[in-house]
Image (cartoon, grey):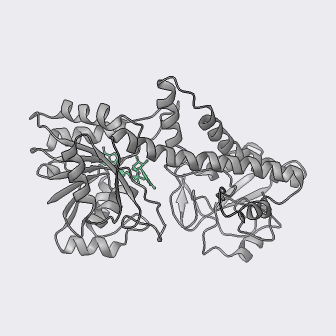
Amino acid sequence: MKVAIIGQGYVGLTISAFAGEYFDVVGFDNNQEIVDRLNSGISHIEGVESSVLQQWIKAGRYQATTDGEDIANADLIVIAVPTPLFKDRKPDLGFIDAACKTIGENVNRSVLVINESTSFPGTLRNYIKPAIEKYSKNKLEHLYAISPERVDPGRSDFNQKNTPRLYSGLNPEASEKTRAFYSKFCDNLVEVSSPEVAEAAKLFENTFRQVNIALVNEFAQIAHSLGISVYETLDAANTKPYGFMKFTPSAGVGGHCIPVDPTYLAAVAEEHGAPATFIRRANEVNLEMSKYVVDRVAADNGGSLTGKSVLVVGVAYKPNVADVRETAAELVIEHLRQRGAVVSWHDDVVGSWNGESSAPLSGADIAVVVTKHDDVKVRDILESAPYVFDTTGKVPGAKGL
Ligand SMILES: NC(=O)c1ccc[n+]([C@@H]2O[C@H](COP(=O)([O-])OP(=O)(O)OC[C@H]3O[C@@H](n4cnc5c(N)ncnc54)[C@H](O)[C@@H]3O)[C@@H](O)[C@H]2O)c1
């Protein structure tokens, strides 16, 4: 069986690596540089080992391509392309549309199309299916299913094999074939009654995280104003064996999921006349954390940051990954610069970003820790500046939330 996976990023390449053990995999991506690197056996995604890729390439079971014709004779197609927001924060399905065009224009037999990209309920039925049909020259009938991705890049305890996977087809045959595909490399498949339930569940999972992170971020501000430790309070609350789940405060949320997916849910809710005030407000609270952090840093430093050299430590959106999408560090840096600080950043996992390179972890007036990678030593952070503000709770001895 030949499987084509559209998009070779965090989700698509991860699936390719697992599927390569059982199927012939074609990884279609429209980024030539990524495709060239993958074909030379180099993975650009944490959690996908280059050695695995090389093994599949050597066995003739993996090939990356930018050529749509290479997916022509696939039996099964997985869509794993970005689903970002427009500038006005409305869902941008442009990448999905482009993927549908590639499928419609190239596939020359009836296939099963599975969407793994995160989007609002109704995307598979009302958007993907009609789009592929619109682009299809030979008017083929395909099967359609959804199986939202739950990968957490950089995480080793949960992966494709042991993370339960939701799925649902537009008809029973699509559901059955979807189950047969994933059951090769996933131990726990959970069928739901419609694609819309699977799509909504994925959005709700990330919305749950978003609102709880906003709640703990607001609580961090309350705790500070009351003169108590937010971390000690959270640990105390967490001794309750039921009805509580610990989230920790931060400079904001980042990555491709938590800052984006809830807005997909809010957008579709509002389109249907349902309120999404809680989701919208949670997003605002998380976005406002960067300003709160900079206000605290300024207050501790005589009220002004003008001319001070500030080193932002860790610009990836979370520890031990190089992913900077939607990182809270961006807003922290923006607020620091607005206040006249001379800002550089240190993050050797990221290396270079926004045309700038990682600076040495030393010699600043002020250090603000946004993300702490495991291999960055606490002592080195504390010695990087006379004043250190930590937003992670992982730098004992520093000022912090
Ligand atoms: N990263 C995660 O942790 C995660 C987890 C669960 C779900 N998701 C969802 O999965 C989807 C993909 O996310 P990702 O993190 O893998 O994105 P990504 O940016 O890492 O990868 C997307 C890839 O798709 C390629 N691409 C874009 N348009 C294309 C097109 N028309 N044809 C072929 N390739 C194209 C890009 O070049 C890129 O390599 C999104 O909907 C996201 O919300 C992501």
Q: Position of residue 176 (x, y in %)?
A: 22, 51
Compared across the picture, whether 399 is left or right of 114 comes to: right
- Compared with 323, 87 (above or below) is above
Q: Residue 62: where, in percent of width, then height?
A: 22, 65
391 or 350, nearer to the observer: 391
> Which residue appears farthest toward the top when viewing the image?
273
Camera sees residue 116: yes
Residue at the image position 76 percent from the left and 58 percent from the top: 309
Is 196 placed left or right of 254 in the picture? left
Looking at the rendered image, the quarter that the N terminus falls into is bottom left
**Of residues 352 and 164, the one drawn nearer to the viewer in this rendering:** 164
Residue at image point 51% right, 43% down: 260
Q: Is residue 146 visible?
A: no
Residue drawn at x 44%, y 41% is: 200
How many discs mark residues in the rendered view?
0
Report whether 310 appears left or right of 277.
Answer: right
Residues 232 and 192: in front is: 192
As rendered, which of 166 and 282 lies closer to the eye?
166
Left or right: 7, with 269 as reference point: left
Pick the quarter of the image with the C terminus. Answer: bottom right
- State the image coordinates of residue 391 (x, y, percent, origin top left): 72, 59
Q: Residue furthest front?
A: 242
Locate residue 31, reporting x and y percent.
32, 51
Q: Quadrant of residue 312?
A: bottom right
Q: Image height check: is 55 above or below 139?
A: below
